[in-house]
Amino acid sequence: MAYFQFLIILLLSPLLNGFIKKLKAMMQGRVGPVLLQPYYDLIRLFSKEMVLSRVTSWIFKAAPFIVFASTLVASMMVPVITTDSSFGMMGDVIAFIYILAAGRFFMALAGLDAGTAFGGEGSSREMTVAILVEPMMMLCLFTAAISAGSTNIARIAETQRLLYSPSHILALSAFIVAIIAETGRIPVDNPDTHLELTMIHEGMILEYSGPHLALMEWAHYMKQMLLFTLTMDIFFPLGIATDTGLFSLAFSLVIFILKMLLMGFLMAWVESSRAKIRFFQLPSLLEGAFVLAFLSLLTYIMMGK
């Protein structure tokens, strides 16, 4: 089971997205979709025929597979229910960030390759957000890595304590903002709209259809749950197993599900209580979070905690 814990992210990530949508609808006084709606959407898309533009190249066709594969590989690097895994040795935070960046790069290329105004706009905005978010995430993870004495995610999860220092609180605050930006949620982006003036992620995949679109959406669900899992591994590792005993894995799985429900509630609450800000105001928000991430690392260096 420890060797296949990434399957939890692969199979349950659409359910987590359905939970967030359902909870957000309830907070807004709407009925909302059923919890399993993302699964129905994926099945419907896989059964549809693909429509490809004549102006697209091999990049447009290969991008969904590269994005899905890079997200799946990143899922193998992150401890889900146990830190004792054969994939744990490759779970370096630097490699993790840049494997996800590779998927983002090809998604942006695919948006440009389609030759549409919306695709180019979405790709340009995505790269602008990435320039601000990726250094912020690296600083947050470096703060935890220095305190643990290792950049290995499993090692960091094993050495974290329940008493948090000022540096960890600052890093957590910045990392939450980074997750909101990475997953394309309000106030950075609106995942439920296709308005050309607001969309970022949707703009890049607007020309996709059928199985290609299903892979893109599934990879997005996985990336969301993956970042939630990384947050819990780094900042709230309580309950994660350090062995592969059956009881330990079962207990850790229950704790993991509760953690994901908590993160889902947090995302739904943020989206229901905030309005999307203008794109040109995003640098102010993300630069503020970058300052928090920088202060977290500086605080740890100066205070030693």
Image (cartoon, rainbow, N blue to C red):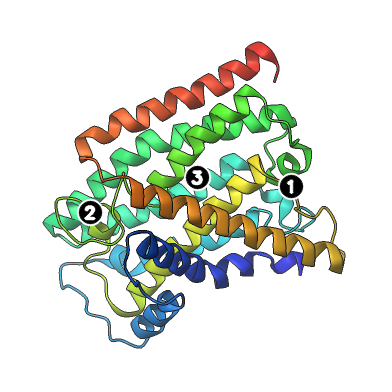
Q: Nearer the viewer, residue 215 or 301?
A: 301
Q: Residues within 10 Å of mark 2 (few under 14, many from 20)?
A: many
Amino acid carrying label 3: it is Tyr
Q: Earlier in the sequence, mark 2 or mark 1?
A: 2
**Mark 2 or mark 3: whose residue is earlier in sequence:** 3
Q: Position of residue 204 (x, y in %)?
A: 26, 58
Quarter of image, res 221: bottom left
Quarter of the figure with residue 87: bottom right
> Please, what secondary structure does the residue beneath circle 3 have?
helix
> In the structure shown, which secondary structural element does the residue marked by tag 1 occupy?
loop
Q: Nearer the viewer, mark 2 or mark 1?
A: 1
- Taking the spot 48% from the left edge, 40% from the top edge, the residue there is 176
Q: Position of residue 167 (x, y in %)?
A: 61, 24
Residue 23 in percent (x, y) is at 43, 63
Residues at discs 2 and 1 in contact (Cβ within 8 Å): no
Q: Amino acid at mark 2?
A: Met
Q: Mark 3 sits on what residue?
A: 98
Q: Which part of the image, by quadrant, shows the C terminus? A: top right
Q: Helix or strand or loop: what does disc 2 sit on? A: loop
Q: Amino acid at mark 1?
A: Leu
Q: Residues within 10 Å of mark 1 (few under 14, many from 20)?
A: some
Q: Looking at the image, is mark 2 or mark 3 nearer the viewer?
A: 2
Question: Distance of mark 1 from mark 3, alpha carbons?
Answer: 27 Å
The residue pinned by badge 1 equals 238
Q: Nearer the viewer, mark 1 or mark 3?
A: 1
Expressed as whole percent of the image width and height from the top left, the position of residue 73 reads: 57, 59
Mark linked to residue 199: 2
Q: Which residue is depicted at the point 14% across and 55% down?
A: 196
Task: Say which residue appears at 17% left-offset and 73% top-offset.
Answer: 53
Please identify the quarter of the rendering in which residue 162 is found: top right
Quadrant where the image shows the N terminus = bottom right
**Sequence-earlier tag: 1 or 3:** 3
